[in-house]
Image: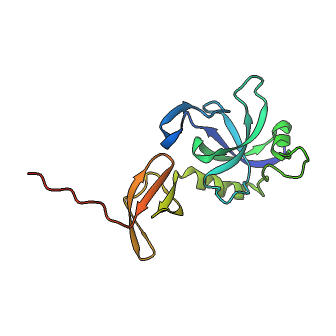
């Protein structure tokens, strides 16, 4: 059977963190249970390293297909799969405004483009700030030192969402008596 389209598929992480600094641990996501399969649309956001458009079965009664914008950090195991289900295909292509003017996301141009993003999203990443200026992403866990241009930045703080770097070296600890 010929697929209707190709899509990036991911699973909801067993545990996700929310709240201030990511200190509240929850099972799955608010609208999707742990391990739920989500179809990830090609995003139109500039911060595709942080938020994505997804279609999946709601964890509430009825388990209807919904499409929503969620943070990427709550997803794991990205891979490319064909879409054979007409219901999923309709949910992927349905406009998200009642007027029908705006699409929720775009379908992938092909399995090669989808695979490129799946590979990128499988590498854990954190949002980064250098001396309070946004700087993209770094690996998770972040390195202790980063060279950017001709400056060396030192890891000042990190949690489950972001890493902050400072151009000031860390303080020296006094020797033991």
Quadrant of residue 65 within the rendered picture:
top right
Which residue is rendered at x = 70% and y = 54% of the image?
114
Which residue is rendered at x = 79% and y = 53% of the image?
106
Nearest the viewer among 12 and 102 is: 102
Image quarter in which the N terminus is found: top right
Q: Is residue 134 above or below residue 42?
A: below
103 lies left or right of 47 = right
Residue 3 visible at all: no
Extreme residue in the right direction: 99
Which residue is rendered at x = 45% and y = 47% of the image?
159
In the rendered image, residue 143, in percent from the top left (x then y), is placed at 40, 58
Residue 23 visible at all: yes
Nearest the viewer among 127 and 93 is: 127
Q: Is residue 68 above or below residue 154?
A: above
Which residue is rendered at x = 27% and y = 60% of the image?
171
In the rendered image, residue 30, in percent from the top left (x then y), is placed at 64, 33
Extreme residue in the left direction: 177
């Amino acid at each position: 059977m010929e697929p209707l389209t190709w899509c990036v598929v991911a699973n909801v992480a067993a545990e996700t963190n929310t709240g201030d600094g990511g200190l509240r641990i929850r099972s799955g996501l608010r609208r999707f249970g742990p391990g739920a399969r989500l179809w990830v649309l090609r995003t139109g956001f500039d911060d595709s390293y942080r938020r994505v458009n997804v279609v999946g079965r709601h964890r509430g009664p009825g388990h209807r297909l919904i499409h929503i914008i969620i943070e990427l950090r709550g997803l794991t195991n990205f891979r490319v799969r064909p879409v054979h289900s007409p219901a999923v295909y309709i949910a992927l292509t349905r406009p998200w405004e009642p007027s029908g003017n705006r699409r929720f996301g775009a379908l992938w141009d092909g399995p090669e483009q989808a695979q490129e993003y799946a590979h990128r999203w499988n590498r854990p990443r954190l949002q980064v700030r250098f001396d309070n200026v946004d700087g993209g992403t770094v690996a998770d866990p972040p390195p202790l030192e980063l060279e950017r241009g001709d400056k060396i930045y030192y890891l000042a703080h990190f949690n489950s969402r972001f890493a902050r770097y400072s151009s000031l070296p860390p303080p020296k600890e006094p020797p033991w008596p």
